[in-house]
Image (cartoon, coloured by chain):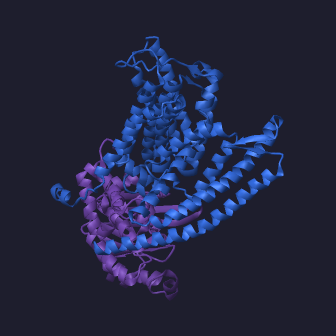
């Protein structure tokens, strides 16, 4: 059986600094994984390596059993992996609807065509409208993305990420910078729109972690030191030692 | 996924279509009627140039406004389109290539697209500043090559041709009016095609690449490919514009038509017209012709004035004239234009004073520097200025200072009134949103 995502002895160095030091991880289809760890542990780097933003120094990344390291981001996206960003990454001068429709186009096969009108692509428009409803931005349909509130932009970011119908979704701190109530609402939204998909999410907020994930991967110092159910991870002595148990790490590490 | 029948029911078409049809009809009528209203030979020259420059500036804006690509070498593609046209016309004139004149611009467009495909392969690998630098380098390179291959580019003298070598229906395209209508027809069709392009998947993804190239990579698109394809399409229309220019002048000169100065002109006027709106470059093309034909006739210092206008535009209205128009239309559509009318009149009056004063000073300085031998008198609009009279200088300075002070005072009031109007509009939109 092949995994949705598999990391095999992944290494990444920037110059002489090794950030990822032999990470191994195997995520089954449909699993919902929270990646946690102290700041600077390499969680975002791991996401960048999986999504093609960075290329590993050595080791392999497999998507549905196929080796994808070294491929550019768009090739990986076409193979069914989509990601969001920690810093909001949308198309500010396009309307909310256009943002979502851009995310839809490739997956429906419209590619680079300039011989058809967007207005006539009924499937793409219908999908964008559905997404608009799903992420709760129907009222803001024709507003420029730049003019949305921060929470709305985060929702749009999720919308663009799921627009292409990818089966593997990576969310990099989706609730960063949100208020408590916004976060609660947002977790609900993420669960809804990623139902049935493989989900990996980097998260600091333990509430979000337990709300979203059925498995937790603990990244410490460039390695995945534990990957198990929340209860098992909490009971894991290595995790306690390296991360959960140490009050110093807790103070530095943003376990809220 | 939602079946497409239910999709249609909630996919909203905006009620823009009637208005849009009217705009295109007006554009067509304007192109047809213009030479009947302005019949002088100067007007014919200007209208013809406006026609193909509209195509060129619009093609440039595919790069600048729609793709966020600041190209300093657009004249390469118009210029090489011109050369393609000239050589084809000569071959056709000798009977060696069976191509009617009306198809020459299409061939020139293919020429432009070919060279855009060739050079764009290098330039569109990069974006932003690097892209701009490479286009500048390539522009200089091709311009220099223009003098290295005299057999193709005609050296210093350029290549001449004769557009009258056959008939299309009953026209032989000898008279300027027939050439104008050929240009006008191309202008309309190309404008429509380029507008259509903005509504296609590639056109929209090009906007996305302009806004945020990194994100585009993560929704399945190769940004280099997007830029490359847009670059070729832009080159195609640039080539058509260049081909029409060649038909219009019957001569192409490498040192002029491939030059970086020419590229800079396209950039400048596309920006002045407004790169953020589709129709902005059309305004830019009209201004380009008025500036280069009329303003240059009026004053030796025309480039100085042009530079000043460009400077002010970049600082105060980076969206160009098109954005100024659209912002005021927005205010008007909310019924708040009336309160601005008086202020606009005042600003205009103050600007006239300031410009008159400044222009008088500039013209007198130019006169002293360049034409002192012709005596102290210099013609200035309806009057004559005396550079030897200190009273004239004092008057000019006084005009400029008074105009400037008045303008600044009115500007401050205008900013307040304008800001208040905008706030009210925002509030109104919010209210509608809540109600919806």
Percent position of residue B125, x then y: 50, 45
Q: Is residue B109 left or right of residue A62?
A: right
Q: Quadrant of residue A130?
A: bottom left
Q: In which quadrant will I find the C terminus of chain A? A: bottom left
Specify whether B207 is left or right of B396: left
Which chain is purple in the rendering? A
Residue B315 x %, y %: 60, 58
Q: Quadrant of residue A233?
A: bottom left
Residue B160 in the figure: left or right of residue B232: right
Q: Quadrant of the N terminus of chain A?
A: bottom left
User: Which of B24 and A3 lies nearest the eye of the viewer?
Assistant: B24
Compared with A13, B152 (above or below) is above
Residue depicted at 33% across the width and 76% down the height: A186
Q: Residue at x 35, y 43 (%)?
A: B24
The chain letter corresponding to blue is B
Q: Residue at x 43, y 64 (%)?
A: B331
Residue at the location (64% across, 25% down)? B147
Q: Is residue B137 visible?
A: no
Q: Position of residue A107 (x, y in %)?
A: 29, 53
Most distant residue in the bottom direction: A247
């Amino acid at each position: 059986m092949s995994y949705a995502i598999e990391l095999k002895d992944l290494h990444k160095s920037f110059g002489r600094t090794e950030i990822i030091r032999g990470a191994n991880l195997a995520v089954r289809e449909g699993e919902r994984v929270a990646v946690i760890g102290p700041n600077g542990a390499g969680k975002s780097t791991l996401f960048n390596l999986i999504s093609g933003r960075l290329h590993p120094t050595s080791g392999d990344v497999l998507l549905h059993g196929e080796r994808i390291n070294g491929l550019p981001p768009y090739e990986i996206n076409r193979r069914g992996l989509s990601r969001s960003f920690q810093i909001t990454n949308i198309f500010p001068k396009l309307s909310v609807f256009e943002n979502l429709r851009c995310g839809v186009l490739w997956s429906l096969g419209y590619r680079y065509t300039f011989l058809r009108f967007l207005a006539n692509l009924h499937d793409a428009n219908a999908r964008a409208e559905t997404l608009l409803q799903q992420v709760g931005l129907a009222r803001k349909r024709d507003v420029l993305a730049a003019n949305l509130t921060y929470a709305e932009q985060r929702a749009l970011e999720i919308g663009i990420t799921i627009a292409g119908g990818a089966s593997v979704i990576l969310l990099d701190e989706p609730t960063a910078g949100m208020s408590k109530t916004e976060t609660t609402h947002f977790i609900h939204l993420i669960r809804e729109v990623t139902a049935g998909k493989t989900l990996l999410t980097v998260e600091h907020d333990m509430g979000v972690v337990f709300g979203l994930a059925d498995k937790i991967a603990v990244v410490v110092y460039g390695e995945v030191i534990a990957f198990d159910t929340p209860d098992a991870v909490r009971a894991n002595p290595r995790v306690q030692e390296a991360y959960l148990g140490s009050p110093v790490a807790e103070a530095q590490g943003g376990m809220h | 996924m939602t079946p497409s029948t239910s999709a249609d029911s909630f996919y909203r078409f905006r009620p823009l279509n009637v208005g849009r049809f009217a705009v295109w009809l007006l554009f067509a009528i304007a192109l047809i009627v213009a030479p009947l209203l302005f019949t002088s030979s100067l007007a014919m020259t200007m209208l013809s140039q406006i026609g193909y420059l509209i195509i060129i500036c619009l093609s440039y804006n595919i790069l600048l406004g729609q793709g966020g690509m600041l190209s300093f070498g657009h004249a390469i593609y118009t210029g090489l389109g011109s050369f393609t046209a000239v050589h084809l016309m000569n071959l056709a004139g000798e009977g060696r290539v069976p191509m009617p004149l009306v198809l020459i611009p299409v061939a020139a467009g293919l020429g432009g697209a070919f060279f855009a495909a060739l050079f764009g392969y290098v330039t569109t690998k990069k974006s932003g500043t690097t892209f701009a630098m490479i286009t500048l380098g390539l522009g200089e390179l091709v311009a220099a090559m223009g003098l290295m291959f005299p057999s193709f580019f005609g050296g210093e003298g350029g290549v001449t041709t004769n557009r009258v070598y056959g008939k299309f229906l009953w026209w032989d395209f000898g008279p300027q009016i027939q050439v104008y209508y050929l240009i006008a027809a191309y202008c309309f069709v190309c404008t429509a095609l380029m507008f259509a392009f903005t509504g296609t998947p590639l056109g929209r993804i090009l906007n996305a690449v302009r806004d945020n190239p990194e994100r585009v990579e993560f929704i399945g698109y190769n940004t280099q490919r997007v830029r490359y394809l847009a670059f070729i399409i832009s080159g195609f229309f640039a080539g058509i514009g260049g081909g029409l220019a060649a038909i219009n002048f019957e001569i192409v000169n490498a040192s002029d038509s491939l030059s970086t100065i020419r590229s800079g002109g396209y950039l400048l006027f596309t920006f002045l017209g407004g790169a953020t709106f589709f129709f902005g470059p059309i305004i830019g093309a009209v201004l380009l012709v008025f500036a280069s034909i009329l303003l240059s006739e009026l004053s030796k210092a025309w480039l100085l004035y042009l530079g000043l206008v460009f400077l002010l535009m970049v600082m105060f209205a980076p969206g160009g004239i098109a954005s100024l128009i659209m912002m005021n239309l927005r205010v008007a559509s909310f019924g708040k234009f009336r309160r601005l009318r008086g202020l606009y009149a005042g600003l205009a009056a103050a600007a006239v004073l300031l410009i008159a004063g400044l222009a008088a000073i500039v013209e007198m300085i130019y006169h002293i520097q360049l034409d002192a031998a012709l005596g102290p008198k210099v013609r200035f609009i309806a009057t004559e200025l005396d550079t030897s009279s200190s009273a004239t200088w004092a008057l000019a300075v006084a005009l400029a200072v008074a105009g400037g002070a008045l303008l600044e005072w009115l500007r401050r009031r205008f900013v307040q009134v304008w800001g208040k109007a905008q706030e009210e509009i925002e509030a109104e939109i919010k209210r509608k949103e809540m109600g919806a």
